[in-house]
Image (cartoon, grey):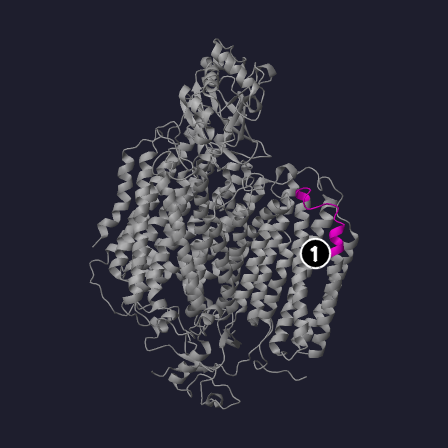
Amino acid sequence: MNRPLRLLPLLAPLLLLAGCDGAGVQSVLDPAGPQADRIDIVWRLMLWVCGAFYLMVLGFLAVAVLRHRRRRRAEGEPPEPHPGREGGLRAALAGWVGLIALGLLTLIAASYVVDRRLAHASGKQGLNVQVTAHQWWWEVEYLDEDPSKRFKTANELRLPAGVPVRIELRSSDVIHSFWVPNLHGKLDLIPGRANEIHLIPERTGRFRGQCAEFCGLQHAHMAFDVTVEERGAFEAWRAHQVTTAAEPATELARKGREHFETSHCAMCHAIRGTKAAGSVAPDLTHLAGRATIAAGALPNTRGNLAAWIADPQGIKPGSRMPFIGLEPDELDALTAYLETLR
Amino acid sequence: MSVAAAHPLSHGGPEEPRRDGPDLPEAETHARLERTWGTAATFWGWLTTVDHKLVGRRYIVTGFAFFLLAGLMGLAMRLQLATPESGLISPDRYNQIFSMHGTTMMFLFAVPIGEAVAVYLIPLMVGTRNIAFPRLNAFSYWVYLSGGVMIHVAFVMDVGPETGWFSYVPLAGPEYSPGKRTDFWAQMITFTEVSALAVAVEIIATVFKMRAPGMSLNRMPLFVWAMLVTSFMVVFAMPAVMLASSFLISDRLVSTHFFNPAEGGDALLWQHLFWFFGHPEVYIIFIPALGMVSAITETFCRRPVFGYAAMVLALVTIGFLGFGLWVHHMFATGLPRLGHSFFTAASMLIAIPSGIQIFCWIATMFGGRPRFDTPLLFVAGFIVVFVLGGLTGVMLASVPLDLQLHDSYFVVAHLHYVLIGGAVFPLFGAFYFWFPKITGRMLDERLGRWNFWLLAVGFNVAFFPMHWLGLIGMPRRVYTYPEGLGWEVWNQVSTAGALMVAAGVALFLLNVALSLRAGRPAGPDPWGAPSLEWATASPPPSYNFAHIPVVASRTPLWDAPGGLPVMSGLKVDERELLLTTLHDARPDLREPSPEPSIWPLVAALAVTVLFVGSIFSAWAVVWGSVPVAAALVLWFWPKGGHRGNEVEQ
Amino acid sequence: MSRPTFAGDLSRLPDHAFGHRSLTWWGVMGFITVEAAGFALAAGAYFYLANQVPRWPPDHPPPDLLWSGLFTALLLLSEVPNVWLKKAAEGMDLRRTRLGLVAVVLAGAVLLGIRALEFTTLNVRWDENAYGSILWALLLLHTVHLLTDWVDTGVLAALMFTRHVNPRRFVDTSENALYWHFVVLTWLPVYAILYWAPRWM
């Protein structure tokens, strides 16, 4: 009657899947480093093993259902178990349990092995970064033994390809989660605790990370840019990040800086080399070099920057940046200045 | 047991109570029992009833109403997420909606509905007249209703909880969740847990002490076993969430520091306590459904379920194992690696008892003569959907893979496959199966098939794409998402599926409405089922059975086609039922059963005042206890002195 | 309607029994199990929190031993009238049951008074730190059980002086004595945890 229809829910998703390959800047299926790669292996193994078991169950169900279609439906006959078949089914049950146990042991072993491999990265020396999560932005500090080489940035992570990086994870308020699926699984940032994630990015490119633990109103808009580049390019970037803010070249930009230093902005934000030294909001010293603003909410363009400063609550309601109410010329000057902060 | 002879007491003089038996005509037995056990058809009667069937029905209806409310919230979420940066719903409102969706589904629908069906069916299935502690049963319904109403009133007034159904601290703590929103959530937990614990104790006592003579433990229907295991799980798991929610209210109201890291508390303590409850909770939701699947499968395959002993062992194993898995919800918190492997193994191993059960049900179909009426269709749907969800659960049990998939839409897919496949599909099957027993009318078969297919196809269209969305990076609990990551089309497909599911549910409501009015009348046993609830009229009389039946097998109605033997000797003019021994169900005591009473409702109101008051002031715990104590004393204060033997002074 | 086959007669069965044959015993045991689970989890939380900090108690002296010691001694002593009461109830001896109930009520009142004093010598407030919070929580949890059982016993005592005396009241009394056992038994580990663990850890 409708037996063939029963197969539809199965096939349809498979057909849809056939057209997808999972490549993307925020994808588990597009590993750019050995950690994500090893996890991808577990995923594929799981898919095959679990898929096989699923097909077995569906097959058994189909056989059980179809074998009775040929018989006429006998209403009202007294029910009767068929004891002859019981022995065979009992043996099959024992075999089924054995098969499940075997399958599970395989998966447990694979999981354990990969878990151990993931721990290997923690032994290696390389880059040290500290990420502190806030509602709803990421404070990023590149650490170094030499204090003059340390610097802060926000909502972005640049990493050299092939170099192990240790990222210390802290939270200043609630629980957040650090997730860059192309590079590794996630790890929580928990107030009162320090967690550590170790990874070794390999493929260069631009990726996206996002907070993966519900952290309040704007959890949906708490992302960050991850750029993996050649070592040379990374060192150049790092050397530049340590420097203080560029001197404004135009009168408008100078006015913008003055406004920044003397108004609300400096209460929260810092721009090294100026009088602004706030510490509760993103460090803006090299803002113009970032791909996005407001924790990945908008691409970093002049128009978006202006829109954000003019009305942060309109774009990201509930975010900690208040609505200030600037005059158009003040906004113009500020934006001009911030654009010079490469 | 003596063979009945002409019993002097059943002649019924003024001193001797009348009893059922060979000397009292059947018609008079029924009439007297109805007078003794019946509930008056008045408002007062409705408020004071202690009939498990009436309480069970209102529990089922209320639970289903919460399902519809939570479903509408889910639909709102899908409409918002159909397009990126949709702007349909504000972030605050969306966060309230998704929190209410989860909270209502888990606490106000999924657990209570399994208990509700059990409250209705268990006394009938074990062959007795009422549930144990019938006034407590009535009380537990009113308390449940109060909690559910309270939180929905809060939601309507825009002070609904907005930190998720799991309410992690510090987000849900006093600093980051000001106001009373989370307090309403935490106190709703108290209401529902008190209610669930009460019902669990009632079920355990009923199953252990009130089974029909001859229904030894190994002759109990699998649904009864399932509810027994569930009830024990409730008893051990719910205190954890009550403790957690009390600590949370206390942190918020009187400045304790259980979860405040600055003063020695720990944010993860919440997670441990919550998930110690939370994981067994999903089995508490799932195991009653397994019982329903067994009942439906054996009836519609016209043979007892294959492997009874294995099935019982599987249920008990799941009950125990379920307590050893909770840390798999916390793999991403950075716990020591040593724990990982244990919880991975335990979380995967639970697939073994589940696998056994799936095999046994399919084997029952294989070795029986299945009749694919709507209830069995839902069982087939359950197998197809739940097993997929169980397998994605095995995937999530692996720590490395979980670190990628945790808190992504992959988990949203997984949980809906196991909860909807594992609990809602069997529940719909159960509705179609037992609706004739409860109402005396059959649901329409044709509408039932449409209902099933819309749900089955719609569900997969709605939730299968979510596996993919999680794999391509979409996190959960987001009120919106950006363009350009490839998430748009799958979100749209998912929303379309949600609309199909809504249509399926609407069709179900239509079926119920039409069938209540004009459905085919059902006799006592329209399906030819084997268990005791089908041995009495549809709907059953207030006293369930005119005489306590005697059982000699696991499928009594199939093995006694000429009618079940019964016991005589219980009073017909006073409420009396039979207690039997724990293991073999030999008759042991005659137990008086409570009359209708207003005190359960009064006590529930007093408890409501106490709980709601304590959201606003700690002193409410003190002054609110007084009316509660008074109500409880009046509840237990005996009426009159005519019952039981007077003791010589 | 057709006549059923009668296979046996129940009229000679008793209508009350003590211990696990009684339905209310199962209710009381169910309740006890629920509460025991709660106590166990709260004790677990205590040790979990203790593990989070290097010193325990972090900044305070441990709670005083005077009132708690007195309480513990008296609580254990109260088992004497309690056990006596349980036996009297099971023998359905009305005079002794009345005496026993009154004795337990009096003992309970004294114990509650000492417990109130105990709260004043804990040396930490519930809102000072997590140690204070869990200490007060465990003590309050036990106190609530002590209080409810005391009220329960009081109500039963009152009932035993009315016309409502019948075998079921004796069953209720026997089960209430069981609950008193629970109150005493849970106190012992809670006492050890609250008063001695900080001195040993």
Would you name the residue on which mark 1 appears?
A: C188
Which of the two residues, B433 or B625, is positioned nearer the viewer here?
B625
Q: Is residue B115 above or below residue A284?
A: below
State the extent of the magenta-drawn residues as a range.
C116-131
Q: Look at 48% across and 68% down and name the residue there.
A: B47
Q: Position of residue B450 (x, y in %)?
A: 26, 54
Which of the two residues, B519 or B608, is positioned nearer the viewer here?
B608
Q: Position of residue B361 (x, y in %)?
A: 35, 57
Q: Is residue B301 visible?
A: no
Q: Position of residue B596 (x, y in %)?
A: 50, 72
Q: Quadrant of residue C59?
A: top right
Examine the structure image and report whether residue C78 is included in the region drawn in magenta.
Answer: no
Q: In the shown orientation, is residue B120 left or right of residue B338?
A: left
Q: Regarding mark 1 in the picture, which secondary structure is present there?
A: helix
Q: Position of residue A172 (x, y in %)?
A: 57, 31
Q: Is residue B543 visible?
A: yes
Q: Chain of mark 1?
A: C
Q: Is residue B491 above or below residue B65?
A: above
Check disc 1 and give the amino acid type.
Leu
Q: Look at 44% across and 38% down and name the residue there.
A: B91
